[in-house]
Image (tube, helix red, strand yellow):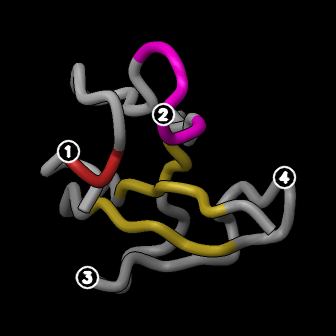
Amino acid sequence: MPIYEFRCPRCGHRFERLCQLGETGANLSCPACNSPKPERLLSSFATRGVEGGKGSSCTSCKATSCSSCSSCR
């Protein structure tokens, strides 16, 4: 099951939820203000490279391994 990111149109709170594939958020409510039907957002994703391989294995910096990157810890 994928993790989807949602944003409340009423208060702007952003949160993640583990959902069924294709879940729209119509049956969810905001955990901050209980407003119904938060908007599902498009999120980026990260892949993990092979340690010691060529190039960066981190999508958020120029580190060659995630163990040396402060964003990935």
In the rendered structure, which disc, 2 or 3, sits on the residue that comes first in sequence? 3
Q: In whole angstroms, how far apart are the C-alphas of marks 4 and 2? A: 36 Å
Amino acid type indicated by mark 3: Cys
Q: Residues within 10 Å of mark 3 (few under 14, many from 20)?
A: few
Q: Nearer the viewer, mark 3 or mark 4?
A: 4
Q: Residue at the spot x=24%, y=82% of the render?
A: 32
> Magenta stretch?
50-55
Q: How far apart, in angstroms, are the residues tagged by discs 3 and 4?
A: 24 Å
Which of labels 2 and 3 is toward the front? Answer: 2
Q: Are marks 2 and 3 in contact (CB under 8 Å)?
A: no
Residue at numbered disc 4: 22
The one nearer the camera, 33 or 56, is 56
Q: Amino acid at mark 4?
A: Gly
Q: Residue at x 23, y 63 (%)?
A: 13
From the viewer's side, name the closer residue of 62 and 4: 62
Give the residue number, with chain letter if any, for mark 1: 69
Q: Identify the element where label 3 is drawn.
A: loop
Q: CA distance from mark 2 to mark 3?
A: 46 Å
Whether 28 is drawn above or below 5: the answer is below
Q: Main secondary structure of the magenta part?
A: loop
Location of mark 2 (residue): 52
| Coordinates of residue 11 in the picture (x, y in percent) | 19, 62
The amino acid type found where label 1 is placed reads Cys
Q: Is tag 3's residue or tag 1's residue first in the polypeptide sequence?
A: 3
- Residue carrying label 3: 33
